[in-house]
């Protein structure tokens, strides 16, 4: 992957994560946790992809943890939907 493509992929991932964060702060009483966690997971995966080209250990560690938390939240939200 070229450095330019990695930058674009990383920016899209960042935008998804910032959008999810903004949504979580602006959502009315009923937030869609599936969409929130999915946006965080995909955004984090895109940033990890970008970090493969522009490696930074601290950022990579943070994104791996962020993806793990989003994956846990997504599984929890999906389990909750199956119960209702």
Image (cartoon, rainbow, N blue to C red):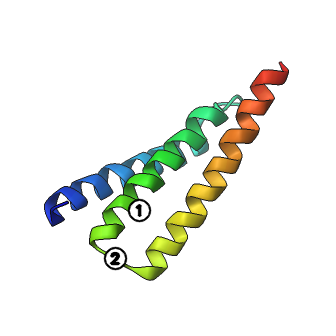
Crowding near pointer 2: few (<14 within 10 Å), some, many (20+)? few
| Residue sitting at x 60%, y 65% | 65
In-image side of 15 versus 71 (left or right): left
Q: Quadrant of the N terminus?
A: bottom left
Mark identifier at residue 56: none
Q: Which residue is mark 1?
A: 48
Q: Earlier in the sequence, mark 1 or mark 2?
A: 1
In contact (CB < 8 Å): disc 1 and disc 2? no
Q: Residue furthest top?
A: 84
Residue positioned 53% across, 74% down in the render: 61
Q: Which residue is mark 2?
A: 55
Measure how far apart labels 1 and 2 are at the Cα level.
9 Å
Query: Image check: 9 left or right of 60?
Result: left
Residue at point 44%, 81% (across, down):
57
Q: Residue furthest front?
A: 1
Provide residue 40's location: percent of width, then percent of height. 52, 48
Q: Position of residue 47 (x, y in %)?
A: 39, 59
Q: Residue at x 42, y 46 (%)?
A: 16
Where is residue 46 drawn, in percent x and y? Answer: 38, 53
Quadrant location of the C terminus in the rendered image: top right
> Outermost residue toward the bottom?
57
Q: Secondary structure at mark 2?
A: loop
- Quarter of the view holding residue 76: top right
Q: Position of residue 15 (x, y in %)?
A: 37, 49
């Amino acid at each position: 992957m070229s450095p330019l493509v990695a930058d674009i992929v990383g920016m899209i991932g960042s935008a998804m994560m910032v959008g999810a964060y903004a949504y979580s702060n602006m959502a009315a009483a009923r937030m869609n946790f599936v969409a929130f966690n999915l946006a965080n997971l995909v955004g984090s995966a895109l940033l990890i992809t970008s970090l493969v080209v522009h490696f930074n250990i601290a950022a990579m560690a943070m994104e791996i943890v962020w993806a793990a938390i989003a994956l846990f939240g997504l599984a929890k939200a999906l389990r909750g939907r199956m119960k209702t």
